[in-house]
Amino acid sequence: MARMVKLEPLTRAAFADFGDVIDCDGVTPKLINQGFAKRYNNLSPTTDLGGLPADGLNVNISIFVAQPRPMPIEIKLMERHPLATQAFYPTQNQEWLVVVAGDPQREESYRGFRATGRQGVTYGKNIWHHPLLVLQPDSYFVIVDRRGPEANLEEVELKESLFVGLGLF
């Protein structure tokens, strides 16, 4: 029998123990560019750059183009970033998935979230999470994380795989 991770809606409250949800819900925008644009500030205020001094601040902003995995999605590896947070924000309005764990070897510590295409996340420092999980081909994401000479990635392979399917909440 396949072991499954149950998916739930991504909300600020449900995700609070793992980091921040990045979305515009409940945020009052500032009108800019002669009224032709809205700016939503401080959507992920708990950014932790791993103790880098202000004069040596190295923030890496990148774009990921991700592909979907076969369904049900097999979870056999988790990762975390010990030195700083890492933020993901989709550039297309397409649902995507977030899987996190308190302890990657304890099935009961897993949480799965179904995010809208208008929501991103900032994983807290040292939070175990699965690499990017998308549902549509060529899914683009803006990533903000730490850049520096020290390794900021730890990976662990699971003793037994878990699986994620859709429609489980």
Image (cartoon, grey):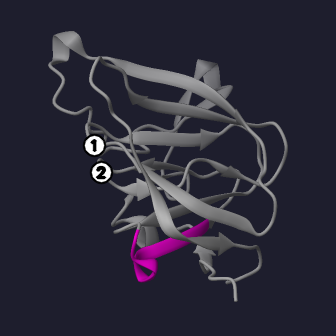
Q: Is residue 141 above or below residue 43?
A: above
Instruction: Tell me the amino acid under the disc marked 1.
Output: Pro
Q: Is residue 135 above or below residue 62?
A: below
- Residue at 77 percent across and 69 percent down: it is 72
**Left or right: 128, with 37 as reference point:** left
Quadrant in which residue 145 is drawn: top left
Provide the secondary structure element on which disc 2 rests: loop
| Quarter the C terminus occupies | bottom right
Decide whether residue 153 is among the magenta residues.
no
Could you tell me residue 116's position as x and y percent?
Answer: 68, 58
**Left or right: 9, with 17 as reference point:** right
- Residue at 39 percent across and 77 percent down: it is 106
Residue beneath label 1, please? 82
Please report the bounds of the magenta region as a residue range.
Answer: 105-113
Could you tell me residue 130's position as x and y percent?
Answer: 53, 55
Provide the secondary structure element on which disc 1 rests: loop
- Residue at 58 percent across and 68 percent down: it is 113
**Left or right: 112, with 148 as reference point:** right
Does the CB distance between marks 2 and 1 fall below 8 Å? Answer: yes
Decide whether residue 111 is among the magenta residues.
yes
| Residue found farthest to the bottom | 1
Q: Closest to the observer: 159 or 114? A: 159
Quadrant in which residue 112 is drawn: bottom right
Sequence-earlier tag: 2 or 1: 1
Residue beneath label 2, please? 126
Marks 2 and 1 sit apart, C-alpha to C-alpha, by 5 Å
